[in-house]
């Protein structure tokens, strides 16, 4: 669910991180911390707790930097760490919220998988299926924007449509995805927030 450009950039950063490059670590932090924050604050509410979760996630990344396989998806690695961090938070609060317990059950089903790419790829497949249901032109605009990383002007030129039309397609695609994600599991929502 990522562009080659994003994958190559992450691989470069991870390789530098493995050698203790603090600048690469900071770059990964700035690239992903806001996405984790945006998701977590909707469900955890307490900003201090969300910041603690983000800090814990990136401490793990720093401490285990030499164990990260740069040739594999950093998204998959981060996805798994984030799941575990959220699970740890909810368990520590011992909440009686039924929705939280439902999320915990979903997270638990993935937490024991040693190869994090399995979980990531399964969720990615679910996301792909949702995107495939978009009308053809809208799907193409979405893919060029989110997967290929093109801006609206570039998409406009490639598809020979107005920039405003591109914007309309993206807005409708995102609205459709948001509406349908409400019916999906916690895991696929987390996936979209972190990686789109």
Image: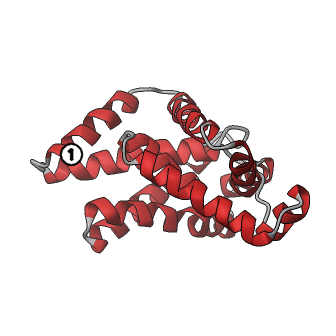
Is 51 in front, or is 148?
Answer: 148
Task: Indicate the position of residue 151 as horizontal and vertical percent values.
Answer: 78, 66
Left or right relative to 110: residue 139: right
Residue at image position (44%, 26%) is 113
Q: Nearer the viewer, residue 176 or 95?
A: 176
Q: Is residue 82 left or right of residue 164?
A: left
SS at mark 1? helix
* Res 28 seen here: yes
Residue furthest left as drawn: 96
Percent of width and height locating residue 90: 23, 50
Rendered image quadrant of residue 1: top right
Q: What residue lies at 47% left-to-right and 41% top-to-bottom?
A: 80
Residue at coordinates 59% horizontally, 63% vertically from top-left?
171
* Residue highlighted by disc 1: 99
Q: Residues within 10 Å of mark 1 (few under 14, many from 20)?
A: few
- Classify residue 11 as left or right of residue 113: right
């Amino acid at each position: 669910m990522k562009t080659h450009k994003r994958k190559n950039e992450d691989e470069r950063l991870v390789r530098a991180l493995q050698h203790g490059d603090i600048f690469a670590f900071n770059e990964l932090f700035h690239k992903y911390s806001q996405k984790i924050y945006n998701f977590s604050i909707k469900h955890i509410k307490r900003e201090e707790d969300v910041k603690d979760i983000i800090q814990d996630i990136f401490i793990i990344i720093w401490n285990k930097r030499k164990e990260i396989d740069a040739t594999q998806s950093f998204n998959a690695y981060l996805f798994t760490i984030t799941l575990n961090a959220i699970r740890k938070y909810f368990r520590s609060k011992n909440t009686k919220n039924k929705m939280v317990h439902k999320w915990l059950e979903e997270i638990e089903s993935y937490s024991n998988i040693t190869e994090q790419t399995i979980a990531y790829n399964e969720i990615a497949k679910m996301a792909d299926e949702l995107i495939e249901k978009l009308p053809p032109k809208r799907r193409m605009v979405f893919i060029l924007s989110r997967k290929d990383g093109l801006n609206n002007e570039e998409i406009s030129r490639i598809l020979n449509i107005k920039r405003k039309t591109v914007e309309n397609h993206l807005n409708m695609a995102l609205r459709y995805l948001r509406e349908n994600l409400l019916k999906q599991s916690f895991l696929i929502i987390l996936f979209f927030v972190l990686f789109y």
